[in-house]
Image (cartoon, rainbow, N blue to C red):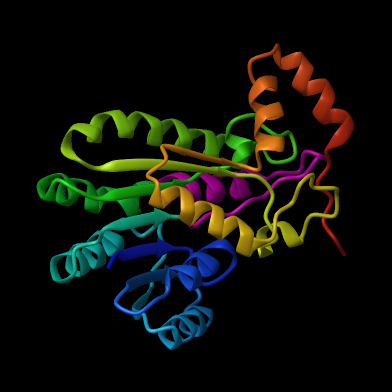
């Protein structure tokens, strides 16, 4: 049975992925900054029979991530790593601050790199392993509501796609996950309409099912992915016009 490492596992899609992976003889390595919520997730997973180890580590801590992952992987080789930790910011009014943008890139991009790089050479040496990177549909067609978030998710999408070709010869699979809006704390603050928003349980099931099939690109829901994918190949003036009329990101009071 698999050993799965998940970052951002204390809430949202990370916590739901942990819950759905939890089963007898499965080992879960759960990382997040909020140790209290992480322990609650771990307890629920252990009740389902899973072996669980948690660590309160910030994915921006390169040395801490490398030390912890190397130690864990030596004791219990990791079969699947899901680099899920991420944040969002920004608004339609354009008040995304420099500090907020830097934080988004630091967690969404550097956090992914710090999560997967300690495992790349180890998985190559074993001739097996699966790396899953959490991108977004915003990384396929940029949203003016969240410039830094869109750019960071585009960066990890392209990075994962390139890494896939590099690691395929070593027996290591790379999947890039591009979900639309999901009912999580990340989207709870949005007061605008989010087309085809998906319950977190359904989203996690979709991800797990496609990871099991070792899909290279996991993008959903299709009725949102396909229009955005088509729009991404048209002149940017088209998407600029459409999004300026349809999207906004004011914060709830």
Figure label count: 0
Residue at 55% from the left image edge and 48% from the top image edge? 104
Q: Position of residue 159 (x, y in %)?
A: 39, 33
In this view, 112 is above or below 78: above
Q: Position of residue 146 (x, y in %)?
A: 69, 41
Tell me where residue 90 sits by quadrant: top right
Tell me where residue 175 sits by quadrant: top left
In this view, 180 is above or below 227: below
Q: Position of residue 129 (x, y in %)?
A: 24, 50
Residue at 19% from the left image edge and 48% from the top image edge? 128
Residue 18 seen in render = yes
Magenta-highlighted residues: 84-112
Q: Nearer the viewer, residue 90 or 196?
A: 196
In this view, 53 is above or below 106: below
Residue at 56% from the left image edge and 62% from the top image edge? 13
Q: Is residue 133 magenta?
A: no
Q: Position of residue 18 (x, y in %)?
A: 46, 69
The quarter of the rendered structure image containing the N terminus is bottom left
Residue 33 seen in render = no
Q: Nearer the viewer, residue 61 or 249?
A: 249
118 sits left or right of 127 in the view: right
């Amino acid at each position: 049975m698999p050993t799965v490492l998940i970052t951002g596992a204390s809430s949202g899609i990370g916590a739901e992925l942990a819950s759905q992976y939890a089963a007898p003889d499965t080992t879960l390595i759960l990382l997040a900054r909020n140790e209290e919520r992480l322990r609650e997730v771990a307890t629920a997973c252990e009740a389902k029979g899973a072996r669980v180890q948690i660590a309160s580590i910030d994915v921006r801590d390169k040395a801490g991530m490398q030390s912890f992952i190397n130690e864990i992987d030596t004791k219990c080789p990791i079969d699947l790593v899901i680099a899920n930790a991420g944040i969002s910011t920004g608004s339609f009014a354009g008040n995304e601050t420099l500090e907020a943008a830097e934080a988004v890139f630091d967690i969404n991009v550097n956090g992914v790199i710090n999560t997967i790089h300690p495992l790349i050479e180890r998985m190559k040496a074993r001739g097996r392993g699966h790396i899953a990177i959490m991108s977004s549909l915003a990384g396929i067609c940029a949203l003016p509501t969240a410039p830094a978030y869109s750019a960071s998710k585009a960066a990890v999408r392209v990075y994962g796609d390139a890494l896939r070709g590099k690691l395929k010869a070593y027996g290591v699979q790379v999947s890039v996950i591009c979900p639309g809006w999901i009912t999580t704390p990340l989207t709870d603050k949005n007061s605008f309409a989010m087309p085809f928003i998906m319950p977190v349980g359904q989203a996690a099931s979709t991800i797990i099912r496609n990871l099991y099939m070792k899909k290279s690109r996991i993008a959903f829901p299709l009725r949102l992915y396909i229009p955005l994918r088509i729009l991404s190949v048209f002149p940017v003036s088209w998407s600029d016009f459409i999004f300026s009329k349809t999207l906004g990101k004011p914060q709830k009071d």
